[in-house]
Image (cartoon, rainbow, N blue to C red):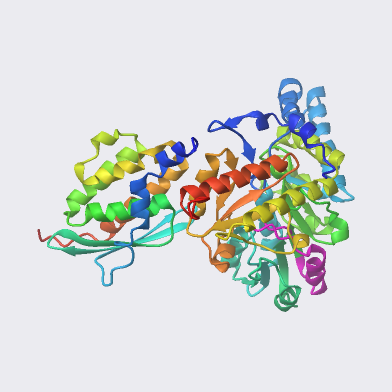
Amino acid sequence: MSRLNVAKIREDFPILRRRVRGKPLVYLDNAATSQKPRQVIQALVDYYENRNANVHRGVHSLSEEATNMVEAVRAKTAKFIGAADPRTVIFTRNATESINLVAHGWGRKYLKAGDEVVLTEMEHHSNLVPWQLLAKERGLVLKYVPVELDGTLSLDKVRATVTAKTKLFGFVALSNALGTVNPVAEMIKIGKSVGAVVLVDACQWAPHRKMDVQAWGADFVAFSAHKMLGPTGIGVLWGREDLLESMDPFLGGGDMISRVTLEGATWNELPYKFEAGTPNIADAIAFGPALDYLSALGLDAVAEHEERLAAMAVKLLEAEPSVTVLGPKDPAKRSGVVSFNIAGLHPHDVGTSFDLEGVAVRVGHHCCQPLMHKLQCGGTARASFYLYNDESDVEALGRALNRTLDFFKIRPKAGVL
Amino acid sequence: MEGDAELQDLYREVLLDYFRSTSRKGKLDPADVRAHGINPVCGDELEITARREGGKIAALRYAGHGCVISQASAAMMGEALEGKTEAKARELVKAFKKMMLENAPVASLPEELEPLSSLEGVRKFPLRVKCATLAWNTIAQGLDAAPAAKEA
């Protein structure tokens, strides 16, 4: 049994009451973005109705209030991820921007021609393209830890690829495409043992599993609020303080400066050095109740709940001979993400057919084209679970599957054999 | 099953037949027209090759992995464009896109595109319209990139 009271949780998510194509919405696209509880939605409305003001500028009460609210969420975020100092929590637009910030602020300052950057074949495009762009500009050497055919990474291959020449090692903590849970702590240790700077893409980790950035010992950790009940448009970069201090700014403008003359400028202190211009005040504030919501439920209970649903889904899918479930077989290495293919049917047709049953799954390459290429599939259909899903959602997935198999004559109809 | 009506409306029998047909699958080598199309939404790739003869498109083949809609659309396109002059082919591309993108009535499709009316249901799924038009955009690109010698 689940430790979560899902019926009660569902009441907090107004969108779960809507219908799609005449059927109740069954939302299984949580790895793309999560739904938002009313607490988050109300915080947005409350900010615009009662507190709207720019931050770090005015001396008037409203501005002070808005500033305090943003800073309170920064402190809350720091606590949530195990960061001792809120100044090391930078608000960005999303995890993609967080990674680009590292590539520009740290990479452009410290990486030179011939330096090696190691990534993995499992990366989301957001942790590939910024480095490819920088590699082209600076003549860096990009290397990739190969992914195993079961969708896992081998620590031996990590050790073989991450060497004394590696200046940066960046990798995804939990695969958005396959649900693979990577051995993050061990991988960070390998990176640190050769003196590399280690960047962790924790987009899929942060919403589902406890993280303690300082115990991990990583240098940079990136994630997005919108995948963890928060609003879109707000992301986080956590960085080691001395690295952040030594880096150059990413974007220039207001708020990030200490003093500007016509000849030049000096930079503001952390974290403002990296937050140029009016920040995303409303969404930063509304991220607070999202963190409260997750903390109240407890991430351990959340992970346990969704992994149980995912295991049920795997069982149901694997009972069909025409269905292949990708990713690790070992449940301990899999999160609440289930990626699958139906023989002879393109993922897009699967997605549309499921949608007609009200079941929202993601189909395609999941922004992981190199990974799909390695696994020799153009894409997959992906069901991803979260804290408001329940057994009836798994049953709906089963109904959609049966209907799809019947309609496309992937298997003979029962009794017609 | 009552819900299947929606599936049947989208994936009409004609469409599934063309999807399964292999008569125009593959690549022509040598070819006079060669074009590569990508659907950025799903990453599907389609390669279209065609041969010219006497001012007409003599043969057209499509290769690549794709969904029912994109593959069936490519198969129907091959059938419709073979034997047509390039000017006629461009006209048909335009007419088909008008039906898919501007909601032009299916009845206004030229007679040569009659089977394409089976893609009508796709218009209710805006994201899937790109699947239906992929082959057509690709051949248009190919014809532009390799204009026919002025003979006919």
The residue located at (83%, 45%) in the rendering is: A1
Is residue A249 visible in the rendered image? The answer is: no
What range is drawn magenta here? A173-197
Inspect the magenta stretch and tell me whether residue A271 lies in it: no
A109 over A381 or under it: above or below: below
Image coordinates for residue A280, horizontal then vertical, percent: 70, 36
Inspect the magenta stretch and tell me whether residue A193 lies in it: yes
Residue B99 horizontal side relative to residue A72, left or right: left
A312 over A279 or under it: above or below: below
Is residue A15 visible in the rendered image? The answer is: yes
The residue located at (59%, 59%) in the rendering is: A368
- The quadrant holding residue A255 is top right
Residue B64 horizontal side relative to residue A261, left or right: left
The residue located at (66%, 46%) in the rendering is: A252
How many numbered badges does the structure rendering display?
0
Q: In the depicted view, which residue is nearer to us: A341 or A198? A: A341
The residue located at (22%, 51%) in the rendering is: B89
Q: In the depicted view, which residue is nearer to us: A278 or B73? A: B73
Image coordinates for residue A288, horizontal then vertical, percent: 80, 36
